[in-house]
Image (spheres, rainbow, N blue to C red):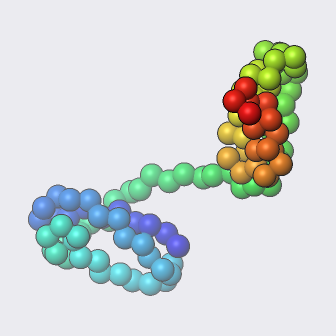
């Protein structure tokens, strides 16, 4: 479902409207002043990697060069980078291993 941005000709506010269907023709009203004099804007968009695409990321030797395998803090930082690269989606086991590395545990 797409989101469209509109600028109000009367109050110059920008409104974002969720459209439930590509074929639906909408005549949204301004959320600020209620006017129907809206002009559709070109919107920015973002593409987020899916979980499957994240799995294609494999740490290289270059990525591992600053990891000290004898330092729990270093391993924890590396695991944080892996988690970030995977879009924050990790298993409970992954989080459990990170907690074991933490000096607070």
Where residue 51 appears, as percent x and y from the top left, is 75, 54
Residue 24 appearing in the image: yes
Residue furthest front as drawn: 105
Q: Quadrant of residue 62?
A: top right
Residue 79 appearing in the image: no
Q: Is residue 36 above or below residue 13?
A: below
Q: Residue at 72%, 55% (x, y): give it.
A: 50
Q: Quadrant of residue 101?
A: top right
Which residue is nearer to you in this view: 58 or 104?
104
Where residue 5 appears, as percent x and y from the top left, is 35, 62
Q: Residue at 39%, 57% (x, y): give it.
A: 42
Total marks shown come to 0
Q: Quadrant of residue 43?
A: bottom left
Q: Is residue 23 above or below residue 5?
A: below
Where residue 35 appears, as percent x and y from the top left, is 15, 74
Residue furthest bottom as drawn: 24
Left or right, residue 14 beside residue 81 = left
Give the quadrant of the C terminus: top right
Which residue is nearer to you in this view: 20 or 24?
20
Q: Residue at 79%, 44% (x, y): give it.
A: 96
Q: Is residue 40 above or below residue 85?
A: below
Where residue 79 appears, as percent x and y from the top left, is 77, 33
Q: Is residue 84 above or below residue 29?
A: above
Which residue is nearer to you in this view: 36 or 93?
93
Left or right, residue 25 beside residue 37 = right
Q: Residue at 13%, 61% (x, y): give it.
A: 11
């Amino acid at each position: 479902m797409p989101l469209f941005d509109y600028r109000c000709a009367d109050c110059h506010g920008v409104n974002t409207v969720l459209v439930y269907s590509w074929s639906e023709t909408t005549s949204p009203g301004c959320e600020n002043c209620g006017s129907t004099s809206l002009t559709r804007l070109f919107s920015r968009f973002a593409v987020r990697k899916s979980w499957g695409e994240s799995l294609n990321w494999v740490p290289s030797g270059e990525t591992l060069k600053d990891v000290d395998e004898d330092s729990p803090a270093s391993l924890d930082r590396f695991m944080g980078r892996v988690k970030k690269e995977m879009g924050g989606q990790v298993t409970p086991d992954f989080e459990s291993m990170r907690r074991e590395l933490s000096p607070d545990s």
